[in-house]
């Protein structure tokens, strides 16, 4: 029931929006739909008692390993909560945007949400792949129609880049399906795969490539900054807050269980690449003059850290990475929302054109500061918990790597505070009247900040959710 | 057999109808006749029994492909009603020639004697030479017909030479006897047989436009009238592939021929996809994409097992559906753009008719092989097949080429969803709308429920 509701609520609403085109009410309808999904997910959370909950288990095309198996475990539920929690705010952010055809915009966003739910619910590798590719299509059209400058070229680059990973993943899955009788494509039967180490070493990259591009980590990131900067605000939010988490989820659900020896073999290389990306992203973020591009590169930096934490491959690292994934989703939405709010007031997101806004918009400045505290991982914020866990995890692997990881926090503090300075501080040069934070701004930012602070002080609920599956994953892998 | 006779008579009837000026009856009569033939085929009770003294073996394989061929021809006839609405002369001949060509196609899906293969391919091709030159006052149409004729004749020559050598080596035209001979050779070499097989395959490969026998296809696709192009890339291709597979399916191929097939597959995949990247005219794009799809189909050939025939049927059937729909959309857009064929003509499609744009997107996504469309399932099954038979690197290469393929289809989708400077003025006849929608829905339905199209 829960699975069906999660897939049907956004899907049917999206179809209705697409065909009925209620231009005036589109945003309200979409908001109600996402809130309903959130309600369902929270209900699922409250009813969750551990283990893997399977709701559907049917053959689709049994002859080639496609089965309709839907359900969730702790990690999947965390991702569902993340998706459901972020989307109402993404829709709400749309109230400030003056995009044409709001019903189509919201329909595409809800289609994306449907497929994202599908990705996190799928318990079969092929089904996962199908939803993974499908989620790309609404985003493709969203960017193509409502994107900024050079959108035609950038969108295609983004699409092809992501599909490169997707096809590589498909190849890997087909290869695995051909190995042995025990594996029927379900996540539950991955344990019966027994792939020789020499194969695992190359198969690792075949499977990992998809998620490395999606996240993205260092040498595969070149699609990301342009796409983030060009995409409409809501598009960037979807990409940065939720879609890249598919990469993280995929690594946990597919790469780690299928090619554990491959992971061991490449662990340090991947961590190194991820950290290079994290530091490189931080340095470039510092040089940006456009607030949205700065957020894009800061996201690159954060994601590098996430990936490094995951590949530390101990309970600290993996739990921390998952926890931080949650924090990062909320953070990205907040940051982008603020950049949108500033652009609304000033007319551009160039930081050079801003400055001195604190006098005009004191409340917004205060909210920005609170978000910033989370962004630089100040203690008592959510990011602090996640990053601390990741550093602890990395420390167990290699002290030098942990040190490199910590330096990204310093970099983060530098570019974030510098950005705040350029946007908010300085002499008041604005002659015109400027509205301070509106009700809508409060509606979006205050709950998000409240969640961030609450989970920063009391991370228990989320950590408990992922603790058991992570332990299981690690112990089952160490047995092999 | 009755269906074959029926279609032949149908062709003659259409010619007479044309002679007496009943233009409006042509397509309806043709469609009713084809549907009757469809029923005959579907209900054929003499399945598996050899016909014409063992020349033709009408088995379930042949029946499945024949049904697909007939359905696609019906779709094309439905399209023809609007397509030929403004044409004054020789409409009946065009329909009749397509039917005659179809008979050739039906023959080569069911041959069990190489003589029938040759006859079938000639019956298939000769009407096409005329059809390709269907626009008599168009220079390019004439060029297409001439090129097709010259190169087709060469291919027929190859084929004949191959058959002669095969006969020389095995003293039989019978497929089973030749397969038996191939088995006796084992690992030894029989130069005569090898060369015979080589030339025979070259002759058939010409019809499916596999590299290096593909040179005719872009020019002919571009020059021929769109309906004929659609016919060539669906009916002719499907029939030729069915024949190709029938030729080698039960034969233990000598190592050299096998290597030749692998090289052909790789070259076809590479050339088709890479050259398609540079195309800006939709028909040429479709020609190269057709070559690319030939590559994927050849990949399914490489290591054939019990599933191959089913995979081929599925791939060809869904490819034909998508292609027919796209060529109709092309015709409509081309009319609106006064004869231009550049992919820019699709600009503004979404603005002017959202439904058509969405269906076009589905069809293109299917050709590109994106999940939930039939094209994805088709490619997926091909990859599974070739991986299961141990072609790891070739499959990996094909996957990369599939990605390249996605690029040029996405470019067309992008055009369709980009607002044009001046609105696209599409006039969509209800029948065309129906056929396009049918193709789109079928592609989606077959993608979600792949079991619907099987042997």
Image (cartoon, coloured by chain):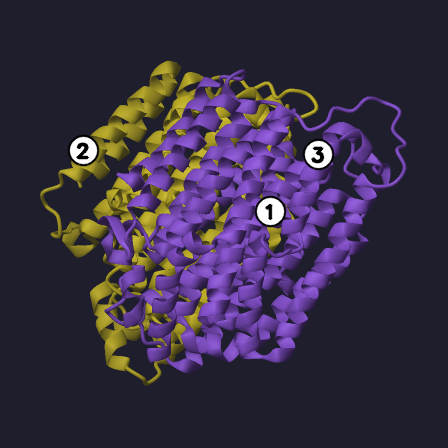
Q: CA distance from mark 3 to mark 2?
A: 73 Å
Mark 2, residue position: B39
| Residue found 82% across the figure and 22% down from its top | A433
Colour used to depict chain B in the structure image: yellow
* Residue B192 location, quadrant: bottom left
- 1 and 3 marks in contact (CB < 8 Å): no
What residue occupies the far bottom of the structure in this picture? B188
Colour used to depict chain A in the structure image: purple
Mark 3, residue position: A364
Same chain, marks 3 and 2? no
Q: Earlier in the sequence, mark 1 or mark 3?
A: 1
- What element does badge 3 sit on? helix
Q: Position of residue B38 (x, y in %)?
A: 22, 34
Q: Nearer the viewer, residue B248 or A341?
A: A341
Same chain, marks 1 and 2? no
Q: Position of residue A475 (x, y in %)?
A: 35, 74
Q: Is residue B335 visible?
A: yes
């Amino acid at each position: 029931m829960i699975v069906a509701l999660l897939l049907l609520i956004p899907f049917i609403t999206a179809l209705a929006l697409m065909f009925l085109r209620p231009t005036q009410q589109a945003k309200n309808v979409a908001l109600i739909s996402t809130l309903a999904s959130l309600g369902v997910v929270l209900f699922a959370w409250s009813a969750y008692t551990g283990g893997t909950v399977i709701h559907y288990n049917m053959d689709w095309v049994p002859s080639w390993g496609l089965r309709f198996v839907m359900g969730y475990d702790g990690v999947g539920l965390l991702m569902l909560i993340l998706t459901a929690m972020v989307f109402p705010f993404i829709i709400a952010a749309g109230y400030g945007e003056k995009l044409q055809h709001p019903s189509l915009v919201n329909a595409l966003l809800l289609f994306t949400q449907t497929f994202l739910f599908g990705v996190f619910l799928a318990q079969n590798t092929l089904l996962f792949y199908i939803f993974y590719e499908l989620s790309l299509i609404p985003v493709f059209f969203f960017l193509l129609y409502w994107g900024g400058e050079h959108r035609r070229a950038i969108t295609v680059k983004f699409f092809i880049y992501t599909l490169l990973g997707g096809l590589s993943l498909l190849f890997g899955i087909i290869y695995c399906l051909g190995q042995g009788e025990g594996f029927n494509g379900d996540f539950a039967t991955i344990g019966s795969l027994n792939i020789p180490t020499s194969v695992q070493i190359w198969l690792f990259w075949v499977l990992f490539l998809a998620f490395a591009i999606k996240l993205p980590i260092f040498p595969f990131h070149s699609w990301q900054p342009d796409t983030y900067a060009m995409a409409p605000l809501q598009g960037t939010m979807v990409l940065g807050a939720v879609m890249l988490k598919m990469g993280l989820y995929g690594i946990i659900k597919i790469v780690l269980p299928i090619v554990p020896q491959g992971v061991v073999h490449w662990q340090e290389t991947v961590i190194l690449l991820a950290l290079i990306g994290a530091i490189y992203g931080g340095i470039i973020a510092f040089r940006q003059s456009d607030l949205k591009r700065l957020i894009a590169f800061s996201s690159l930096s954060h994601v590098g850290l996430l990936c490094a934490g995951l590949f530390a491959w101990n309970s600290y690292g993996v739990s921390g990475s998952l926890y931080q994934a949650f924090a990062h989703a909320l953070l990205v939405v907040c940051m982008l929302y603020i950049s949108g709010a500033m652009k609304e007031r000033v007319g551009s997101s160039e930081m050079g054109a801003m400055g001195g806004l604190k006098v005009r918009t004191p409340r917004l400045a205060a909210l920005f500061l609170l978000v910033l505290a989370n962004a630089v991982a100040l203690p008592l914020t959510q990011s602090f918990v996640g990053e601390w866990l990741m550093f602890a995890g990395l420390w167990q692997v290699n002290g030098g790597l942990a040190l490199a990881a910590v330096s990204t926090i310093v970099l983060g503090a530098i570019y974030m505070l510098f950005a705040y300075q350029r946007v908010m501080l300085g002499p008041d040069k604005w002659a015109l009247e400027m509205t301070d934070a509106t009700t809508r701004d409060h509606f979006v930012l205050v709950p998000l900040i409240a969640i961030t602070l609450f989970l920063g002080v009391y991370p228990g609920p989320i950590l408990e959710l992922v603790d058991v599956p992570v332990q299981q994953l690690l112990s089952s892998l160490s047995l092999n | 057999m009755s269906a074959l006779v029926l279609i032949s008579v149908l062709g003659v009837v259409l010619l007479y109808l044309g002679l007496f000026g009943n233009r409006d009856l042509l397509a309806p009569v043709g469609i009713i006749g084809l549907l009757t033939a469809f029923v005959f085929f579907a209900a054929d009770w003499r399945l598996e029994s050899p016909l014409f003294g063992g020349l033709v073996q009408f088995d379930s394989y042949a029946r499945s492909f024949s049904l697909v061929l007939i359905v696609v021809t019906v779709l094309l006839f439905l399209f023809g009603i609007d397509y030929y609405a403004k044409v004054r002369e020789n409409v009946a001949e065009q329909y009749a020639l397509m039917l005659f060509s179809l008979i050739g196609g039906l023959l080569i899906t069911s041959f069990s004697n190489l003589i029938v293969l040759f006859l079938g391919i000639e019956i298939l091709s000769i009407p096409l030479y005329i059809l390709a030159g269907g626009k008599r006052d168009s220079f390019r149409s004439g060029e297409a017909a001439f090129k097709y004729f010259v190169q087709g004749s060469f291919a027929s020559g190859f084929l004949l030479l191959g058959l002669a050598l095969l006969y020389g080596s095995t003293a039989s035209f019978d497929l089973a006897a030749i397969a038996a001979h191939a088995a006796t050779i084992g690992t030894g070499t029989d130069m005569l047989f090898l060369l015979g097989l080589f030339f025979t395959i070259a002759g058939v490969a010409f019809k499916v436009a596999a590299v290096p026998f593909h040179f005719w296809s872009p020019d002919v696709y571009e020059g021929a009238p769109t309906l004929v192009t659609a016919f060539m890339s669906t009916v002719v291709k499907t029939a030729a592939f069915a024949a190709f597979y029938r030729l080698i399916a039960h034969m233990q191929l000598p190592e050299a021929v096998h290597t030749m097939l692998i090289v052909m597959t790789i070259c076809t995949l590479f050339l088709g996809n890479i050259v398609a990247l540079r195309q800006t005219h939709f028909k040429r794009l479709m020609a190269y994409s057709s070559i690319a799809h030939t590559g994927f189909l050849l990949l399914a050939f490489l290591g054939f097992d019990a599933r191959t025939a089913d995979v081929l049927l599925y791939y060809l059937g869904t490819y034909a559906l998508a292609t027919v729909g796209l060529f109709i959309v092309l015709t409509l857009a081309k009319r609106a753009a006064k004869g231009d064929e550049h992919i820019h003509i699709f600009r503004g499609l979404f603005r002017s008719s959202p439904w058509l744009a969405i269906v076009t997107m589905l069809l293109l996504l299917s050709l590109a092989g994106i999940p939930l469309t039939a094209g994805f399932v088709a490619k997926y099954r091909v990859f599974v097949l070739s991986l299961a038979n141990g072609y790891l690197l070739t499959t990996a290469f094909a996957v990369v080429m599939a990605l390249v393929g996605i690029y040029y289809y996405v470019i067309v989708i992008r055009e369709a969803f980009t607002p044009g400077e001046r609105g696209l003025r599409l006039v969509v006849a209800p029948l065309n709308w129906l056929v396009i929608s049918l193709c789109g829905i079928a592609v989606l339905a077959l993608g979600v429920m792949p079991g619907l199209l099987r042997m």
